[in-house]
Image (cartoon, grey):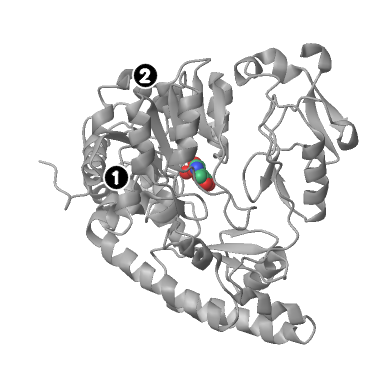
């Protein structure tokens, strides 16, 4: 009988580490005796493989199966799968599991790289859902029901919808309305809930929990917000979706995109985190809500108004574990460096803001260190740079540095993903100097970060607006992902004769 008090995989492994075992099996560290650090030796004891009694992730029938069933029960899912290659592997698997080459899918444009990888590998035809602009427009937010409705009406041939909620910045979409719209016209909904595994465990967040809101497949990075180890994620299938999805095909792709040597330490941490979420999650999130309110107040007292306050005022539901702080005209990278010199490390940095994860495992006392570091910085710099304690920070509008806006035009797809996935396209590229790029077809992703929305995806035509944006972005020191020439003096394009 499944019981949320139990941690079948975690306890089984724990018992095993207490035994005097003889290890005639991989991994090669054989229990870690050669590690000089006692902490490493302790971890190595937990690091086993599919030996007798340890079950098999790729064909589970005992402790892993039970741990997965308990996760499904905790989330009210029809079936849950442990993932040891992160949410990236779950998104690759679910997109391959649900769709077929050439299918049209509606995809939030500011999707994670793994979603784009899946679209390209499988050769899907994405139509993009452009998230509603919010202030500042350099931050990408969520897909609203009206954006989805328009797209569903326009592309009735679409087989499914792929969205992200909450976003990296903690913006949650109205997934219940989105999934209702999808199901009214028989479309499957995949939600990338990489940043929202904890939403299930608190009444204030539950209404935004994707699975409870009716999404068909939800993939969560347990390791991002719950006490699971890095790479530990879970893919859930909604009970109501079990009859609609080819589960054999999904099983197959989950196996394809995962290692055959899954980490037992990671899997046990998933079992631990599910149990922790069920029993301690609500109280911990309560504490996090209070902590964030207090930190916001303290920041405002020193002249820093977190962007979260603006976003909440505009009606967005923001994750209590995320906090975005403007750097008030100090370059964010410089601030990151100053904080690191005080052993304070942050989640994300941009030219004009930083993003903090207010982790559930953190003590509120940590915030004192952050505040003290910021106060010290403001005091020491005020004389040199009066802008630091920016009076504009108290305005109702968000102040940003001179960031270029992404071109509003829809992408011009010259070569669809279904053709790009053919080998000939991977082999037929050349470098084109930036000033000569207009009219060429790009062969790589160009993703300014933030906002993390691709400026260009492979197969799209480069326009003057794109090049103007890149010049401005270079000037604003915006970081780009996806490009092979990180100086952005050239872009990888397809040979013209191929088009
Ligand atoms: C929105 C989003 N989706 C998916 C992923 C991939 O998650 P994982 O690191 O667990 O593979 C990330 C990682 O940062 C992400 O931010």
Q: Is residue 394 left or right of residue 435?
A: left
Q: What is the crowding at mark 2: few (fewer than 14 residues within 10 Å), some, or many (at least 20)?
A: some
Query: In this rendering, would 91 be left or right of 12?
Result: right
Pointer 2: what residue? 249
Query: Toward the viewer: 366 or 29?
Result: 366
Can you say which quadrant of the picture contains the N terminus?
top left
**C-alpha gap between disc 1 and disc 2:** 38 Å
Rendered-image quadrant of the C terminus = top right
How packed mark 1 is, by other alpha carbons closer than 10 Å (few <14, some 14-19, many 20 or more), is few
The disc placed on residue 408 is none
Which residue position holds label 1? 21
Could you say which quadrant of the image residue 488 lies in? top right
Q: Nearer the viewer, residue 479 or 212?
A: 212
Residue 271 is situated, as x and y percent measured from the top left of the image, at: 29, 47
The percent position of residue 136, horizontal first and vertical second, equals 62, 57
| Residue ID at (47%, 18%) | 157
User: In the displayed structure, does residue 104 sit left or right of residue 488?
Assistant: left
In the rendered image, the residue lying farthest to the left is: 1
- Quick check: can you spot residue 273? no
- Residue 377 seen by the camera: yes
Residue 182: which quarter of the image? top left
């Amino acid at each position: 009988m499944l019981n949320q008090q139990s941690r079948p995989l975690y306890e089984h492994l724990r018992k095993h580490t207490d035994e005097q075992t003889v290890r005639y099996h991989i991994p090669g560290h054989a229990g870690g005796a050669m590690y000089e650090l006692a902490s490493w030796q302790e971890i190595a004891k937990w690091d086993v493989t599919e030996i007798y009694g340890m079950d098999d992730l790729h064909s589970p029938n005992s402790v892993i199966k039970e741990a997965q069933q308990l996760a499904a029960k905790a989330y009210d899912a029809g079936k849950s799968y442990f993932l040891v290659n992160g949410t990236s592997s779950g998104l690759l698997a679910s997109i391959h599991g649900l769709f077929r080459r050439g299918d049209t899918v509606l995809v939030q444009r500011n999707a994670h790289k793994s979603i784009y990888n899946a679209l390209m590998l499988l050769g899907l035809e994405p139509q993009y859902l452009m998230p509603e602009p919010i202030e500042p427009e350099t931050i990408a937010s969520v897909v609203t029901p009206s954006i989805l409705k328009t797209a569903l009406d326009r592309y009735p041939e679409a087989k499914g919808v792929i969205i992200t909620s909450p976003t990296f910045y903690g913006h949650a979409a109205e997934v219940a309305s989105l999934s209702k719209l999808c199901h009214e016209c028989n479309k499957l909904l995949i939600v990338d809930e990489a940043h929202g595994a904890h939403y299930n465990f608190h009444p204030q967040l539950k209404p935004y929990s994707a699975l409870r809101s009716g999404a068909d497949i939800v993939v969560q990075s347990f390791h991002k917000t719950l006490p699971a180890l890095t790479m530990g994620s879970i893919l859930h299938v909604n009970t109501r979706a079990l009859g609609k999805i080819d589960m054999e095909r999904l099983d197959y792709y989950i196996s394809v995109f995962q290692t055959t040597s899954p980490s037992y330490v990671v899997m046990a941490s998933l079992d631990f985190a599910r149990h922790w979420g069920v029993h301690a999650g609500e109280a911990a999130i309560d504490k996090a809500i209070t902590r964030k309110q207090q930190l916001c107040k303290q920041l405002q007292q020193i002249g820093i108004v977190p962007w979260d306050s603006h976003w909440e005022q505009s009606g967005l539901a923001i994750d209590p574990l995320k906090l975005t702080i403007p750097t008030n005209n100090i370059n964010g990278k410089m601030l990151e460096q100053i904080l690191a010199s005080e052993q304070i490390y942050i989640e994300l940095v941009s030219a004009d803001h930083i993003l903090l994860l207010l982790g559930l495992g953190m003590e509120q006392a940590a915030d004192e260190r952050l505040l003290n570091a910021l106060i010290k910085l403001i005091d020491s710099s005020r004389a040199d740079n009066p802008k630091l304690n920016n009076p504009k920070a108290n305005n109702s509008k968000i102040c940003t540095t001179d960031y270029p806006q992404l071109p509003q035009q829809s992408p011009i797809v010259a070569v669809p993903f279904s053709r790009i996935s053919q080998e000939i396209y991977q082999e037929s590229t050349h470098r084109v100097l930036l000033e000569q790029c207009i009219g060429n077809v790009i062969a790589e992703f160009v993703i300014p970060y933030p906002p993390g929305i691709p400026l260009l995806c492979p197969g799209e035509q480069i326009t003057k607006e794109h090049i103007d944006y890149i010049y401005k972005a270079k000037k604003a020191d915006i970081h780009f992902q996806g490009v092979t020439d990180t100086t952005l003096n050239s872009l990888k394009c397809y040979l013209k004769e191929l088009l």
